[in-house]
Image: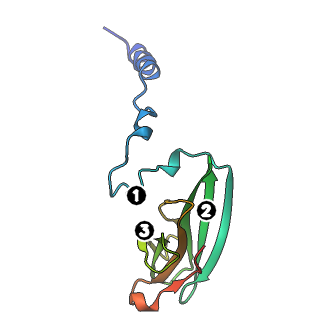
Amino acid sequence: MFSRKAFVLAAALVMAAFPLAGTASAATPLPCGSGFSCDEFDPGLASWDQKDTDDRVNGSGCSTMELRSGKNNGMWYAWARATVGSVCGKYDVWIDRSFDGGRSWKLMGYFEIDDYKGSDFGNMVYWPDNAVVRLGTKGHWEPFSASRLTRWH
């Protein structure tokens, strides 16, 4: 019979010798709906060379949304940071990405934030050199026509 201490030690050794998570999956394309908007880039694996806050927009009431970006190995990513004061309700936040200078775009990186959270970050979106991005926000109760948008970057 193994003692409890011996069993825990053996389990720890097995886990150290055969880790459950590897980095080989990082080369595999990510499925749509994985939070990376079908870009097949996982910015969570990145260590950032540079980070910027590109723009801000105030939501209706007491919220502030920031368009943020980061660069890793020459590739840019964009994401949103939302800050909502207490008793301000729920907000929708997203990134628009365009490949034609903003004439048409795809809504990406969408998330909702409630006032009880205070602050949160949205999904990261790959930002290739031939694209422009902007941040959009609106109160969850508002129609999209009431959206507040940053300028294109």
Q: CA distance from mark 2 to mark 3?
A: 14 Å
Q: Which mark is residue 108?
A: 3
Could you say whether the residue bearing mark 1 is in a helix, strand or loop?
Answer: loop
Q: CA distance from mark 1 to mark 3?
A: 9 Å
Query: Which residue has dot 2 on it?
Result: 69
Residue 119 in view (yes/no): no
* Among numbered discs 2 and 3, the one appearing first in the sequence: 2
Classify 32 as above or below 86.
above
Image location of residue 113, percent across then percent down: 46, 73
Residues at marks 1 and 3 touching, judged by CB atoms closer than 8 Å = no
Whether residue 53 sits left or right of residue 146 in the image: it is: right
Label 1: few (<14), some or many (≥20) within 10 Å? some
Classify 65 as above or below 129.
below
Say what amino acid the circle numbered 2 marks.
Ser
* Among numbered discs 1 and 3, the one appearing first in the sequence: 1
Label 2: few (<14), some or many (≥20) within 10 Å? many
Query: Which residue has dot 1 on it?
Result: 35
